[in-house]
Image (tube, rainbow, N blue to C red):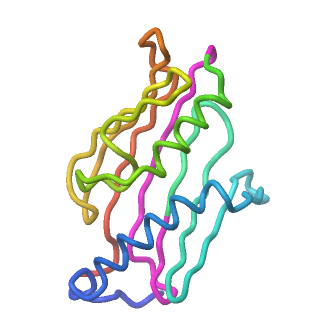
Amino acid sequence: MQKPLGKNFMKDHGKELEVFLRKGINSEFTVRAVERPDGRLFQSFKDGDWEYENAWLIGEPSSGETVIRYKGSPCWSMSYRSEMMAYADKLEVYACLREALKKPNSDGYFRGPTEFHTRKNYSYYNVQHGPLTKFNGYEYIKDIDGDVVFRIHYNGGVIGVY
């Protein structure tokens, strides 16, 4: 059993966690996913004492979980469920999502901005409730006609730090 990180973890390491989370999200588009024997795709990214893990089930709809560890102990997680509409251009939709998630956000959102429009006629929207420590939200992408072509619901927060 892993040792909890303690109640001062966010005070001592909260800013580091935020910075590493952004690095981890950006790594999802550069680190190759590996298929596990259980059918999940898995990505991992390390930087010093921090490790970012993302694992998801292949298919439509899809679901997964992201976990961040500090010195080997889990400190943050997010579960998500996504759905791509059958009529969507998957490559274009994922390109929009990738571009949006790389954008800085001044609203305190860590997944992407509240709204982002691409040159390819797609629009990304993110509605997040709560801070990094305990949150839920959803994202969706619309095509030029205003039809939702992709959506994801997510929730999570800090773990093992109390």
**Nearer-the-camera pick, 6 or 50:** 50
Residue 139 position by quadrant: top left
* Identity of the residue drawn at 45% across and 21% down: 142
* Identity of the residue drawn at 51% across and 36% down: 82
| Magenta-drawn segment | 67-87
**Nearer-the-camera pick, 99 or 135:** 99
| Residue 77 belongs to the span the image colors magenta | yes
The spot of residue 135 in percent (x, y) is 26, 54
| Residue 116 belongs to the span the image colors magenta | no
Residue 14 position by quadrant: bottom left
Q: Classify the position of the C terminus by image quarter.
A: bottom left
Residue 107 horizontal side relative to residue 63, left or right: left
| Residue farthest along the top direction in this orientation | 145
Quick check: 25 above or below 5? Answer: above
Residue 21 horizontal side relative to residue 105, left or right: right
Quick check: 59 above or below 104? Answer: above
The spot of residue 103 in percent (x, y) is 42, 50
Residue 118 horizontal side relative to residue 92, left or right: left
Quick check: 21 above or below 93? Answer: below
* Identity of the residue drawn at 46% across and 9% down: 145
* Identity of the residue drawn at 54% across and 77% down: 51
